[in-house]
Amino acid sequence: MQWLTELYEQNKRVIDVAIQSFPKIIVPGLTVTIPLTILSFTFAMVIAIAVAMIQYARVPVLRQISRFYIWVIRGTPLLVQLYLVFFGLPSVGIVLDGFTAAVIVFSINEGAYCAETMRSALEAVPVGQIEAGYCVGMNYFQVMRRIVLPQAFRTAFPPLSNSLIGMVKDTSLAANITVVEMFMATQRIARANYVTLALYIEVALVYLLFSTVLTFIQRRGERRLNAYTAF
């Protein structure tokens, strides 16, 4: 145990800074990072479902617009999109605060990826079930609501959950547009105390904690969906 005491004495300042910094890191995580993730992913899912259903229905002009949107968003870096909205739009008179800009960009960016996930899930629903819905007198919207979408959501749940976990980590990019989320808070503490390694390890562990909680929820959700499907 003596070596532990010696190690603590040698790194006492670093350990003290890490301990004192934990509340300053976790609070922005709970009040900024998590709300930013939830809002962005909610709007992203609205975009994704709309775009996926447009492609699934093969509406000629709207389908081409949807494909163009997906092509542009998936083909450009997320960081560039953040800079374009936050630093670029003010040149044409549109000024947004950092949090609002981050929500808009994350929603649009994630919506493009989730739209492809939803589209593939919609197309995985057997055509026979859709035809059966029409045969019993359902219209298009009833078929989508009662037959296609429920099955598509079960298929898309795992990849969508992975997208949500990825978004939690991607929110660290919002620090580049002045959003005081978890990573920016850590950067400020590191600049003030010149303790970098310990603090960045600490914030990485907090991101890991958030991701682990979401992974646990994902697994529980998958088990419930599988049990419902089996029933």
Image (tube, grey):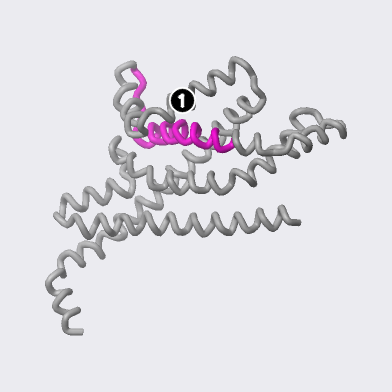
Mark 1 highlights which residue? 71
In this picture, is 18 found above or below 81? below
In the picture, measured across the screen, residue 230 lies left or right of residue 115, that is: right
Instruction: Single out the residue that lies furthest toward the left.
Output: 10
Residue drawn where x is 36% and y is 57% of the image: 206
Identity of the amino acid at label 1? Trp
How many numbered circles does the render carry? 1
Residue 79 in the image: x percent, y percent? Answer: 33, 34
In this picture, is 84 found above or below 33? above
Residue 117 in the image: x percent, y percent? Answer: 55, 38
- Density class for disc 1 (Cα within 10 Å; few <14, some 14-19, many ≥20) is few
Residue 224 in the image: x percent, y percent? Answer: 65, 57
The answer to which quarter of the image holds residue 211 is: bottom left
Residue drawn where x is 29% and y is 60% of the image: 22
Residue 123 in the image: x percent, y percent? Answer: 65, 34
Taking depth in this image into account, of 123 and 45 the one nearest to the observer is: 123
Taking depth in this image into account, of 64 and 92 the one nearest to the observer is: 64
Magenta residues, dominant SS class: helix
The image quadrant where one finds the N terminus is bottom left
In the picture, measured across the screen, residue 231 lies left or right of residue 48, that is: right
Residue numbers of the magenta segment: 93-118
Instruction: Single out the residue that lies furthest toward the right.
Output: 136
The answer to which quarter of the image holds residue 138 is: top right
Residue drawn where x is 37% and y is 51% of the image: 29
In this picture, is 148 found above or below 81? below
Does residue 88 belong to the magenta stretch?
A: no
Does residue 113 belong to the magenta stretch?
A: yes
The image quadrant where one finds the C terminus is bottom right
Q: Secondary structure at mark 1?
A: helix
Residue drawn where x is 59% and y is 43% of the image: 156
